[in-house]
Each structure stands twice: as C-alpha cells, then as structure tokens.
Amino acid sequence: MKKSFIFLLGLITSISLLAQYSPKDRDVEETGKASKAVYGEFLGGGLIFSANFDTRFKGYKGLGLRVGIGGAGGTGGGILTFPIGLNYLAGEGPHHFEAGATFTLVTAAFDFGGDTGSDWFAMPHLGYRYTKPSNSFNGRIYVGPFIGNGL
C-alpha cells in the first residue's frame, strides 16, 4: 500500500507557493547577487508537505540548490523527509522554465504493511516558475515521477 500511495503522489502535479525573498535580494537583477527563497511545498519532493530553502548560485536564474524538511503525521506515528536537489531556471522576466532533480531521504516512524525504517526516492521534474527579484512571491508548478528504492 505504501508503494501505491507514493506512486500516486508522483503522478500528481506538485505545487509550491508563498516564497519570501529577503529585502537584500530586491536588487538581484542589477547586482548579480544570488537570489534566495523560503517556501512551503505541497505534494512534491517532501511527499505531503515540506519547508524548503532555494538559492541560485548567481543571479535570479540559472543553476540553483534546494534543501528542505518535510513530512506527515497521524495516529501512531509519521514520516520525516529530507529533500535536497539541483534545479535550473531559464527564461526572461518573471516567467521561467524549471528543470531539476531532487533526492529525498524518507524515515518512517510507523508500520505501512510491514515496512518501517528509512527509504529514499529521486524525483526529476520539469515545470514552470514565476519569480521576480523585486517581488516577495514565488510560485511553482511542476510534474515528475518518483523513482526510488523498491518503488
């Protein structure tokens, strides 16, 4: 059942919204400083929900890094996820094509049909990102499969 649930989540489009840029990043376009964002993600690399930090290595597009922590809980336990990935933004203005891959370590604190302990999966993805260096809003929508240990 765990494998079916995770597979179905992988087929669903992932959405993350409400990223906040720090005030120092408002001049990213002019200075070339790396942009940074903190955002919540639903049905993505963190499975159910995750809080993430995303940064560009230079400017507000190009190659970047994302790290996060996520999970879900319920009666009798829960899961904790640790997504880390690379992504690339291409485009002009606030509209960008995003391509990337995320590797996620999953730890389970309860029994899913006999499966407990740790597992992992990778999620390559393609999508769209709306982001402006002078704005505090960052929206993403992307799709990608879950590829993992035993999935």
Image (cartoon, helix red, strand yellow):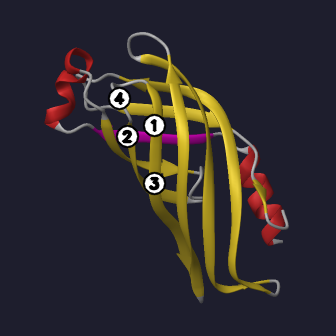
Distance from disc 2 to disc 1, alpha carbons, whole Å, reads 5 Å
* Residues at circles 2 and 1 in contact by the CB criterion of under 8 Å: yes
How crowded is the residue under tag 2: few (<14 C-alpha within 10 Å), some, or many (20+)? many
Crowd tier of the residue under label 1, counting other residues whose Cα lies within 10 Å: few below 14, some 14–19, many 20 or above: many
Residue 64, labelled with which disc? 1
Q: Earlier in the sequence, mark 3 or mark 2?
A: 2
Separation of disc 4 and disc 1 at Cα? Answer: 8 Å
Mark 2: which secondary structure?
A: strand
Residue that carries the numbered disc 2 in the rendered image: 55
| Kind of residue at badge 4 | Lys
Q: Which residue is mark 4?
A: 58
Give the Cα separation between the discs numbered 3 and 4.
17 Å
Amino acid of disc 1: Gly
Compared across the picture, whether 80 is left or right of 40 comes to: right
Judged left or right of residue 64, residue 33 is left
Q: Secondary structure at mark 3?
A: strand
Dot 3 corresponds to which residue?
67
Magenta segment includes 129: no
The CA distance from mark 1 to mark 3 is 10 Å
Is tag 2's residue or tag 1's residue first in the polypeptide sequence? Answer: 2
Quadrant in the picture for the N terminus: bottom right
Residue 112, image x, y percentages:
76, 81
Q: Residue at x 49, y 27 (%)?
A: 129
